[in-house]
């Protein structure tokens, strides 16, 4: 799934059941897919960090874009002693 050198990866969201599949790109874009229909989701800013909010039934989850890009595309995975600063 590459377009203009943009690589998309499927998110694995633990304890969050949704009818959508969510993807993060190597360029920090975020999209959902349901029944082969793609939708690029708008992002918001929380304390100067880009974030996305997703919902499933009664649950809501906020994800920070820089953390997702680091987790899915970085060489090292963030841990409690190793975190992302941009």
Image (cartoon, rainbow, N blue to C red):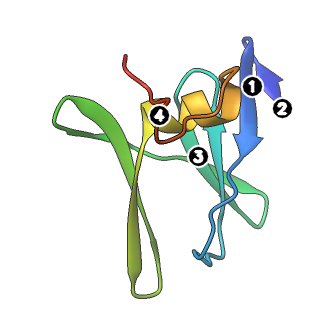
Residue 36 falls left or right of residue 58 = right
Q: Residue furthest front?
A: 81
> In the rendered image, which residue does mark 3 sit on?
31
Q: Nearer the viewer, mark 4 or mark 1?
A: 4
- 74 is higher (above) or lower (below) than 68: above
Q: Nearer the viewer, mark 3 or mark 1?
A: 1
Location of residue 5 by image quarter: top right
At x 68%, y 26%, the residue is 73
Quick check: marks 1 and 2 in contact, CB under 8 Å?
Answer: yes
Element class at badge 1: strand
Q: State the image coordinates of residue 82 (x, y, percent, origin top left).
A: 50, 29
- Which numbered dot is residue 81? 4
- Quarter of the picture containing the C terminus is top left
Residue at left offset 47%, top offset 47%: 41
First in sequence, mark 4 or 2: give its number: 2
Label whose residue precedes the other's in the sequence (4 or 1): 1
Q: CA distance from mark 3 to mark 1?
A: 12 Å
At mark 2, the secondary structure is loop
Seen in the picture, residue 8 relative to 12 is either above or below; the reply is: above
Q: Position of residue 29 (x, y in %)?
A: 53, 32
């Amino acid at each position: 799934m590459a377009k203009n050198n943009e690589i998309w990866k499927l998110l694995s969201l633990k304890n969050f059941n949704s009818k959508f599949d969510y993807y993060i790109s190597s360029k920090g874009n975020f999209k959902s897919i349901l029944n082969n229909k793609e939708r690029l989701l708008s992002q918001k800013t929380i304390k100067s960090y880009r974030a996305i909010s997703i919902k499933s039934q009664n649950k809501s989850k906020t994800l920070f874009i820089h953390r997702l890009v680091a987790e899915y595309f970085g060489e090292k995975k963030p841990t409690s002693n190793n975190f992302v600063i941009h």
